[in-house]
Amino acid sequence: MANKKGLTPASSRSPATGSPAPSGATRPTTTGAGTTSGSPAPSGATTASIVHPETPLEEDRGDLSLRPRYLQEFLGQAAMKENLSVFISAAKQRKESLDHLFLIGPPGLGKTTLAQVVANELGVDFKVTSAPALDKPKDLAGILTTVTEGTVFFIDEIHRLKPTIEEMLYIAMEDYELDWIIGQGPSARTIRIPIPPFTLVGATTKAGMVSSPLISRFGITCRFSFYEQADMEAIVHRSAGILKVSIDDDAAALIASSSRGTPRVANRLLRRMRDFAQVLEQGHISRRVVQEGLKRLEIDSLGLERYDREILKIIIERYNGGPVGAETLAISVGEAVDTLEDYYEPYLIQAGLLQRTPRGRMVTPFAYEHLNLERNSNGNNGLLF
């Protein structure tokens, strides 16, 4: 018996009645712990965590097999990747550590992954931390005193470094030495501890909050952009192959177009579509499965989830389309200003739905069209239908 959404759970029909696998495709055989039981998550249950890549989920951290290990496997960001390949090759030929590397871009685009890729390409150790974890100078010293020749040391959210930590880092980056104070009061003295040459990789979503002295010490700057559709489709196909799940080309294209130009989101959606396919379509991801999955997760054709649409609707319905200040809007939607600016606005702007102006945020005509809303001549907004 067909369910309400038009798809029949695979468990309720014989294999003979299921949709045939496409030519050349192999459907995975799932047994034991890999078997999914029960119904898919209810509408909206996991939407926010899927389409907003700011905080990696446990499955993002655990499923390291999906991450590329070398530049050849790193899809997208072609110009940046080509330049990095040259810089890495030159450093290896000279047997020197790579210049310090500054990575800028929204969450989920591959900054941490690229840092690991650089270490793999150089064949050196990789150490990773985040700025909030470096609370005291001894925290930084504890890491720097363990680096080996050429180590890639990655600091995420580098814009959140404390001034004392940042000043300590200056000397380490420039002179490969560590300043350390011994004693207290008048008898205190500073000694310099030599450390092996290393490569610092700093990543940020807020380049404007990184101090000029720190930025000036990075020899290489890479700015990430949202991924193109073709690159996103290639990423989905690559991940599907690693997960050993069969997927149609048009299904991969739909996942890609709904992933906000962000690989982390694409991989999350792929895993969720794998769940729907396993329960509803015997494990094969077709376009119909993806359409059904996106509908249940309330993710639309642009990759917007319910909360994104609510932000746009609030600007339209309460503020006549804008302009409205960031603080006022944040209060209206019940979010912190930083969360609004860092995690929601970048893609809304990239998608052409929102504008930042000197007077505040304004929705675009495309936002009205996408939400099926119109601006009436009297300034009020309403549904078209």
Image (spheres, rainbow, N blue to C red):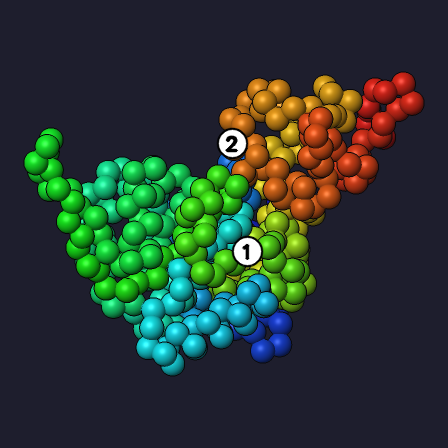
Tell me whether circle 1 and circle 2 mark residues in contact (CB < 8 Å). Answer: no
> Looking at the image, can residue 333 be seen?
no
* Residue 86 sits above or below residue 232 on the image: below
> For this rendering, which residue is in front, 309 or 14?
309
Left or right: 32 as drawn, with respect to 188: right
Q: Residue furthest right?
A: 377
Q: Residue, x 69% and y 35% (percent of image)?
A: 356
Left or right: 208 as drawn, with respect to 227: left
Give the labeled residue for mark 1.
223
> For this rendering, which residue is in front, 140 or 363?
140
Give the labeled residue for mark 2.
338
Left or right: 121 as drawn, with respect to 10: left
> For this rendering, which residue is in front, 46 or 94?
94
Q: Residue furthest front?
A: 186
> Looking at the image, can residue 91 be seen?
yes
Depth-wise, is mark 1 or mark 2 nearer the camera?
1
Q: Residue, x 54% and y 72% (percent of image)?
A: 82
Q: Residue furthest bottom?
A: 93
Q: Residue, x 17% and y 55% (percent of image)?
A: 193
Mark 1: which secondary structure?
A: strand
The kind of residue tagged 1 is Arg
The kind of residue tagged 2 is Asp
Separation of marks 1 and 2 at Cα, in angstroms: 21 Å
